[in-house]
Amino acid sequence: MKVRRTVVLGVALVALAALLVGLSACGGSSSSSSSGAASTTPVKGGTLTVTFQGEPTGLDPAIAWEVESNCIERLTYQTLLTYASTTGEPGTKLVGDLATEVPSAANGGITQGGKVYTFHIKKGIKFAPPISRDVTAGDMKYSLERMLRSPLAPATYFYTGITGAQDYIDKKANDVTGIKVVDPYTLQVTLDKPDVSFLYAFTLTFTSAIPKEQVDKWGKKVDRHPLGSGPYVIQSWTPGQEIVAVKNTNWSAPTQQYVDQFHFEFSSNPGTAVLKLERGEVDLLGDSIPPADYNSVKANPQWSKNVVEAPQINSYYVYLNHLEKPFDNQKVRQAINYAINTQKIQKLLAGQAVAANQVYPKGMPGYEDGKQFYTYDPAKAKQMLADAGFPNGFKTTFYTHNVDPFPKIAQSIQNDLKQIGVTATIKQMDRATYWDMVGLKASHFGIGLTDWIMDYPDPSDWIGPLYTNPSEGSANLAWYDNPQVNKLYEASKSELDPVKRIDMFKQMQDIIMNDAPLVPLYQTVQTSMFGKNTGGFYIHPVWIFVFQEYWKTNGK
Amino acid sequence: MGKYIVRRILWMVVVLFFVSLITFLLFFLGSSNPAKAIAGTHATPEVLARINRTLGLDRPIYVQYGKYLWALVHGDLGYSYVTQQPVGASIMQRFPATLLVALWGIFFELVIGIPIGMISALKQYSVRDRAFTVFSLLGIAAPSFWLGFIFLYAFAFKIPIFPLGGYEGWLHPLYGVLPGLVLGLGGAAWYSRMLRSSMLDILGADYVKAARAKGLPERTVVWRHIMRNAVSPIVTLLGMDFGWFLGGVLVIEIVFSIPGIGQQAWNAIQTQDRPMIMGTVLFGALLVTVSNLVVDIVYTWLDPRVKYN
């Protein structure tokens, strides 16, 4: 019958075509040869292709802060300060970006006991064409004031400590009196109260130098038409698909500008991105290797050397709300610390996490190497519960949101608690609702999961928001308020000796771990994969990606 | 017929109005705080309050809905809370990718489903029929993300005929083949079953016997008499499928890295980006109602007994 013949013929043709293409493909597999060891001399030229599943929400540095936005903003914009271009704890050291050096008491940059900061701006750093003029202290003042008054700016709270900032935001003043242009290349910032951690706020992309001409020209659309003094400029942005970045011809530094072009691919499935990288179509994965592919990639001798892993400076932990019984009882909180098996959780997260045992994550100054505050000891936990007046345990509800891996961690913890007689019912909800309700008194969330990703690698970024000043909707989910910690914290703000200052934070951690408003669980590990022709790749402890430091070994 | 179409379009407007109202109200059922999604979990209550004020989220529900509706009738779908880009433009910018995949999906549904259904019906209980039955059951049961990865691995990685996902515009239509195939396979399985049972019903009808008795060639009997009637349920399904495909099938878009309106809607849901969610829902509702209207008009051609007045 005609239909049958047509169908059979069609199927045969497709099969033949597949066979022919298959045969031709086998012979022509391109093996981009790399010597195995990454070369250490940068090679100029070529296009570096990076994949992301997400996409920047915008490139207005005053507003956009997620990973994708942040690392592309750092290609185009510069801030006064940044971090050393290296891995591990040395990579958390402050260095000058637009500034000649980091202000300190020794070089006279920090005066009045930590209240006044003077920045000297490097001469000759130019904005990209067509603006092509020097970045000045006036530009810094303009950029900071613009950010403070941006209606959607999410991070003004870092800068309201500057004298006159709040008045400026409230439109009670026409400029911020605490930001002073001493001369075209000198900027002076005065705080209401001393706060040495304030220097870190000048690494954040919210303080990027943006020229007034660009904002005047594009208005609100400047988020799609960025222009700064960074080594690259955005040539095009096809929403949902790609961004192409090319060299800023006004970049004069000898480093941080190697490839001719960056090609960022968005909406890219992380699983197929691995396949694309293996084929040489892509040079770097912007997302971590998916857990399903992680083991096979690490076991593959061809690719295991192209995987880089670095613990991230973040904390995933259980909060114990002092306002909810029985978590107002210190012995109960300590018992729970002995009851939870963090090694089991690390195994559950197979290569994507490292077990944590203290307030600060590893890699952050203040972390006390080798110190173990609590061990996994269910027998001891049970005993402590009995001492606390709960010989038969108690019933409670454990709160979490429903995005992986939180639900399976909640189950693991539920099991651990059961071993010591605590019956926990898991209450799960969608992520947005969870973050809305957690931290509100009326929610009565006594115990649950939470996380904290760093703004900057300084222990003040943990202590301040998480362990002082509890209030409705704050990040201090344990409603923890200890006068000793508060006193030390205030004192740390004006401690100019960095060693003494970190010591104070170690003391704070000791007190907090004893009070046990939390159970530390883990910190995540970023697992990145780079292609055979990608050179210079490393994971930065703060920025994760510093694209301007990478190159193509074959210059293509 | 003209009056019928006008009436249908008026009803479409009513449907869209209620879709917009119900979707809008759903946001207020649970706790909703888009400001936190925009500003991040570190933001202080003051920052969140300011963002809420900027976006008009501190006004009463009826004020917010009224403003939305007023803008809507002027063709303004608002601005995304997260990207601050106009919603209408964002949807239209991403729609071609979804459309390419949808068209390939329809193509495969028909090209695979109809021949298989026909052969199964005409050669009932033959080896082919039984083989096709098994294929249909697999096609209906197989999860699309699993099928997608298998096809990607086989036909894009191991044998590099097709690209490893992605989208490069309508000038490179091959990017839509694999996702369309996965989209279409499930539907093809359904269509083949429906067509088979529909044709089997008709094969026993009197007018078919009469046509054969008249000595008409089998080809004419099958196409002009049997198929024209058997294909009605397929047309209904096709209309619904097309509307659904055009709304952006999220799983396909994620597996194949298609930057379509499905992924955009998913991101919007996770960040409580209300204008984007509303815009996508209304757009999807529009496509579905228009598809249904087109299907109803096609019926009048297929079956002259169908009249609208």
Image: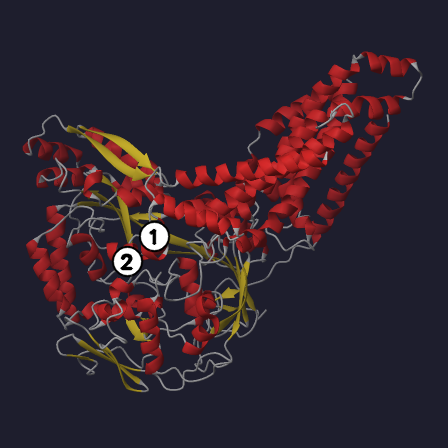
Q: Position of residue B9 (x, y in %)?
A: 62, 38
Looking at the rendered structure, which numbered label has been put on residue A376? none
Q: Is residue A533 left or right of residue A476?
A: right
The crowd level at tag 2 (other Cα within 10 Å; few <14, some 14-19, many 20+) is many
* Residue type pointed to by label 1: Ala
Say above or below: A288 vs B13: below
Considering depth in this image, is A210 or B78 the residue closer to the camera? B78
Q: Which quadrant would the N terminus of chain B be assigned to in this image?
A: top right
Q: Position of residue A397 (x, y in %)?
A: 23, 32
Q: Position of residue A302 (x, y in %)?
A: 52, 53
Residue at point 30% right, 62% down?
A: A155
Callout 2: helix, strand or loop?
A: helix
Looking at the rendered structure, which numbered label has been put on residue B47? 2
Residue at point 41% right, 72% down?
A: A77
Kindly indicate whether the residue at mark 1 contacts the one at mark 2 (C-beta within 8 angstroms).
yes
Residue at point 26% right, 71% down?
A: A168
> How many numbered callouts?
2
Considering depth in this image, is B69 or A544 the residue closer to the camera? B69
Toward the right, the furthest residue is B215
Callout 1: helix, strand or loop?
A: helix
* Residue type pointed to by label 2: Val
Spatial CA span between label 2 and label 1: 9 Å
Protein chain holding label 2: B
Q: Position of residue A57 (x, y in %)?
A: 44, 58
Q: Which quadrant would the C terminus of chain B be assigned to in this image?
A: top right
Whether labels 2 and 1 belong to a single chain: the reply is yes
Protein chain holding label 1: B
- For label 1, the residue is B35
